[in-house]
Image (spheres, rainbow, N blue to C red):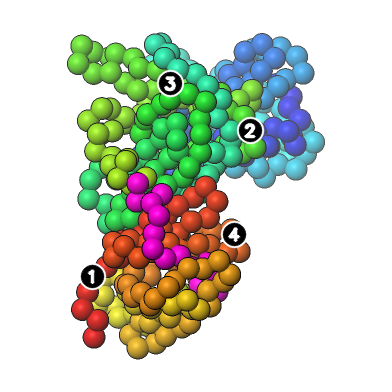
Amino acid sequence: MILKTKEFKNNCAIILSAIDNSEVSNLNENLELKTEGRILLLNVTNKEYFATVKFDLEHEEDFHATVNANLFLKLIAAITTDEIELTIRENYMAVKANGNYKLPLIFDNNEMLILPPITILNKTLDMNISGEILNNILQYNSKELVKTSIAKPVQKLYYLDQEGCITFTTGACVNNFVLEKPVKILLNNRLVKLFKLFKNSLVKFTLGYDAISESIVQTKVLFETPAISLTAILPSDDSLLAQVPVEKIRGLANRTFNYSAIVNTEELLQAVNRLILFNDKKDAFPLGDFKCNSDEICISNKGSTENIKSGNGSNVEEEYSMTLNLDSLKTILETCIEPQITINFGNNQAIVICRGQIKNVIPEITRRVI
């Protein structure tokens, strides 16, 4: 089988990004190459997800090989010839390009290893989701989960419904968008990481529930484009879904606050970065004391201070003081591509950072200021 190197490299780069190296699994070290007529399928799995990238062939081929994924994909990435020739031998796959290479085939009981696909038997919903929505979930909601203050297993998951996506720990990220049909599921981080496969694509989404015993029903999803297919088993069930305080979080994110300040994103981030330097190592996290008035926000930490001017449209009628976790603020600011953000505050509970469809909730911290 002879392949055009440039196009095949692009497909291999996609499938390489689908390999979850953080997961300990023999299966996700393997790559299955299998033809169906004039299409070459590149498959990887870790038993929780099954990803396939399709490569169009010039003519029909009969080819099936399972090899070490990292070795094969990194070899292809390093090839500079115009074409690559793949040939199956008795116990290895021969790759002919800049040189001649042998990759051992992987067998299961003397038969070529077949990676077990994940299929949805009982489909209950299908609709289209833009790749931009999926990548926004990856870019913004995932940042909430990098915090170490996770008390419940559900706080490691992404809540998705027809109104948007929510992740929450001590604070929350509320990502607002509208889906075509009602849905309510939980996604895990391993699956969301794979959303980078769907940049600038319209994705067909399928949801289903398959019984694997009298008492166990698996929630399954399929994200699919003409070139990429991603099926996954979700950790989603009614008991976990009930643990997400959806109305409370959205209510706080969308409420009308007494005060709001519009600030330059980069100026605020740089100030926070400088003030974090003065944090004591004995402290669990850096705390910043904020004093807000109609003209500026004064931030202090360990006696060091910075002043950030408020922009036009700000509304602070009287001085307001609060204490925030600077690490949490920094993590959010680093995801902001907007030159300005709006900070809503004034209820002595939390602030909400707004930019576009994304709202981040950061709780105020009560402490005795020395």
Label 1 crowd bin: few (<14), some (14–19), many (20+), radius 10 Å: few
Q: Which mark is residue 201?
A: 2
Residue 203: x and y, percent? 58, 28
State the CA–CA distance, disc 1 to disc 2: 45 Å
Label 2 crowd bin: few (<14), some (14–19), many (20+), radius 10 Å: some
Reading the image, the residue beneath label 1 is 366
Reading the image, the residue beneath label 3 is 207
Tell me which segment is drawn in magenta. Answer: 251-268
Left or right? Give the position of 220 relative to 101: left
State which mark lies toward you, 1 or 3.
Answer: 1
Q: Where, quadrant-wise, is the N terminus in this rendering?
A: top right
State the CA–CA distance, disc 1 to disc 3: 43 Å
Mark closer to the chain start, 3 or 4: 3
Q: Where, quadrant-wise, is the C terminus in this rendering?
A: bottom left
Q: Is 257 a magenta residue?
A: yes
Mark 3 secondary-structure assignment: strand
Mark closer to the chain start, 1 or 2: 2
State the CA–CA distance, disc 4 to disc 2: 23 Å
Mark 2 secondary-structure assignment: loop
Q: Three-letter amino acid code at disc 3?
A: Leu
